[in-house]
Amino acid sequence: MSEARGRKSIFITGAASGIGAETARFFAKKGWFVGLYDIDERGLEDISDEIGKQNSLSGVLDVRDRDAWNAAMRNFGEATERQMSVLFNNAGIGSFGWMETIAPEESDRMIDVNLKGVVNGVYASLPYLKETRGARIINTASTAGIAGSPQLAVYSATKFAVRGLTEALDHEFSDFDVKVCCLLPWFVDTPILDSAGQEGANRFMKDELLASGLNVYPVSMAAEKVWEAAHGKQMHYLVGKDAERARFAKRFFPGILQKRIARSMPKRES
């Protein structure tokens, strides 16, 4: 089994693609030992081969499964001498479309992965984080967790919850010397943007965003912000100028922001 051998370490969920995979590449290049966890076995194998098995430990993890979390933590702890510099709670899913077009079961799945998965990660990792000097938790929220986003209603709700959890735990865990912060990306070019608005549709979320004139940022920008979050003192790390504008507008001009959101909302197709 690969070992950290004194290197700083990061445990990443959703590591097989998107922000998770790019963050793994970024931290491995900086000399960190990387834990790669996802439900996508093939994707995990690819990213592990890319960054080097001597620099990583990988395992299949469904973040909804508490027993699986505990098993993954035990394996990671064996490789790092129970040290964990960063838990990156990144795994997430999203469905794009009007509320009534998304099956209730899919909404349940978003809540279970995006919110309960983060809570499970906090419980499982805390004993290891408490034993690591200057450790921290980084949770992936979203700009959709700043302002409610039409056609992303349940996804948006989970990200509001992740942001609230982050803010509360940052205070709670200060006695443990564990910093808690969150990543708030604008739309980033990840597999989540490949979701269709309606069953059978040939236009995906990314198509709709670009057609509406909205920006989609490269995944590398998010990985750089995770690095900042692993070392900085802020609680919120925004990815993209649009995310910064949204937070500013929400704070100082909430009425104008709501009008802009209303104007940008497409009409339902009959």
Image (cartoon, rainbow, N blue to C red):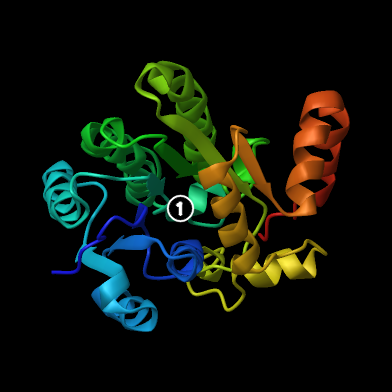
Quadrant of the snapshot with the C terminus? bottom right
Disc 1: CA contacts within 10 A as few (<14), some (14-19) or many (>=20): some
Q: Position of residue 109 (x, y in %)?
A: 33, 49
Residue 79 in view (yes/no): yes
Q: Residue at horizontal 75%, vertical 55%?
A: 266
Residue at (60% x, 67% y) in the render = 219
Location of residue 177 in the rendering, given as x and y in whole percent from the top left corner: 40, 25
Q: Where residue 240 appears, x then y in whole percent? A: 73, 54
Whether residue 261 appears in this view of the structure is: no
* Residue placed under numbered mark 1 in the picture: 102
- Describe residue 64's horizontal placement relative to residue 185 as left or right: left
Q: Is residue 187 above or below residue 51?
A: above
Residue at (54% x, 67% y) in the render: 190
Along the line of sight, the residue nearer the viewer: 101 or 217: 217
Residue furthest front in the image: 6
Q: Quadrant of residue 7?
A: bottom left
Q: Secondary structure at mark 1?
A: loop
Q: Nearer the viewer, residue 246 or 33?
A: 33
Say above or below: 19 vs 263. Answer: below
Q: Quadrant of the N terminus?
A: bottom left
Which amino acid does the dot numbered 1 rest on?
A: Ile
Which quarter of the picture shows residue 55? bottom left
